[in-house]
Amino acid sequence: MAQESQRFFNENEQDVLEEILLHRRDVRGNHFKKDSISKEDIDRILQAGLSAPSVGFSQPWEFVLIHDQKTKQAVKASFQQENEKAVHEFTDVKKQEYIKLKLEGVTEAPLNMAVFYKPKNEPVLGQTSMPNMGKYSVVCAIQNMWLMARSLNIGMGWVSILDPEQVKKILNAPSENQLIGYLCFGYTNMFYNKPELEIKKWDYKKLQEEVVIQEKYS
Amino acid sequence: MAQESQRFFNENEQDVLEEILLHRRDVRGNHFKKDSISKEDIDRILQAGLSAPSVGFSQPWEFVLIHDQKTKQAVKASFQQENEKAVHEFTDVKKQEYIKLKLEGVTEAPLNMAVFYKPKNEPVLGQTSMPNMGKYSVVCAIQNMWLMARSLNIGMGWVSILDPEQVKKILNAPSENQLIGYLCFGYTNMFYNKPELEIKKWDYKKLQEEVVIQEKYS
């Protein structure tokens, strides 16, 4: 049957995926190299995004590729403003730890990418009862790109300490677009072997039994 | 440096990931086999979820594993109710196409999984300016599980034509939990080689140039 995929994955291939999942990190500006990313690698990352699942096959995504240093500086200014506000939400020890963290790599990363959700003007199959599904499809595209980047030994960081409306203004984005993720990509001088916030004891790694419930909540 | 990952992925490994991304499908009830999924495979899928990125390392996820047929039937009833409403949102040709589609596999799948976002009572690093980030972390976990399942040759379907509040009630979920995804897992008799909604011409596959913008919107 021509519509059927004959692809059966073997143990070795399962292990490769598992390793990519385990070695994916959020990379910040202190670990990006300046080398620009080749067009071939950017295309492979984008194609990974385009092969993500989307609710009702709506593919409700738009990807803005940013190399211009002026745009990055404007986005960085939004980060600084929002981060200044964020610091005050934490108290005592956490505040002291927070201040020490490098939380983005906007100007250091050779490539930035703003990823938008573009709503449709008509009903979307699968989105009629859960209106967030379109946004979630865009997140699936981001996660696919994150994994593809890691397999290409390219670091990615997701910057969320930003005012989405300011970013839209900087990029001239249509009013209906919603910013889902602002991503920084670059080759790196290292990947941590664990999440940086785990290494720095910001929080502990949860165990499977803490988050898995059998059948229903008691 | 002990905190550094020495893992460098090669071309062959990049191709494996690319193939898993390209061969991942949304699988519905007409293609699930009855065979139950081994504990080992369930654990590998869950571990893929647990290795997802999460905002501020908050790991704001809970996974409910459902084998009980009565629970599945109650969820299926919610689907039927919501789907009945959904049909009326589409007009003419689309409505006729919609009716013919098999859109879930709740009772046919040996394993169902409800995935929740559990908000914290304190500020979360990275979530102070973009409050949806916690939910997006849960979506990253779902996408990781979807890919791991596909590599294990296990089909997964994401059912979104559901009333989240009804599902919470069925599962006795705490009031603060928010349903992000309701997933069906099972071995399959086939995977389509393209998205089913593309094959059935519900919508066309977008090209890269339609969704990629250089530098900023004009």
Image: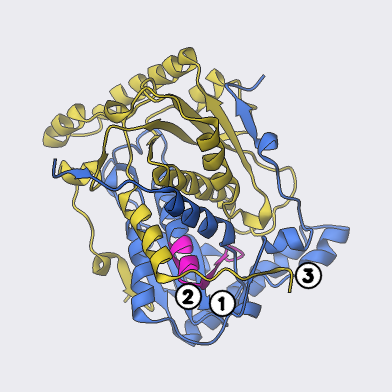
Chain colours: A blue, B yellow
Indicate which disc, 1 or 3, sits on the residue closer to the N terminus. 3
Q: Which residues are magenta?
A: A145-162
Outermost residue toward the right?
A92
x and y percentages locating residue A92 in the rendered image: 88, 59
Whole-angstrom CA distance, mark 2 to mark 1, is: 7 Å
x and y percentages locating residue A93 in the rendered image: 87, 60
Q: Amino acid at mark 1?
A: Val
Which residue, given by chain and number where applicable, does mark 1 sit on? Answer: A106
Residue A153 part of the magenta-drawn span: yes
Tell whether label 1 touches label 2 (CB within 8 Å): yes
The verdict on a common chain for dots 1 and 3 is: yes
Q: Is residue A207 above or below residue A135?
A: above
Q: Tag on residue A99? A: 3
x and y percentages locating residue B201 in the rendered image: 15, 44
Residue drawn at the location 40% of the way across and 75% of the way down: A65
Task: In this rendered view, identify the residue nearer to me: A110 or B126.
Answer: A110
Residue drawn at the location 44% of the way across and 42% of the way down: B149
Indicate which disc, 3 or 2, sits on the residue closer to the N terminus. 3
Task: In this rendered view, identify the residue nearer to me: B148 or B39.
Answer: B39
Which residue, given by chain and number where applicable, does mark 2 sit on? Answer: A112
Whole-angstrom CA distance, mark 3 to mark 2, is: 24 Å
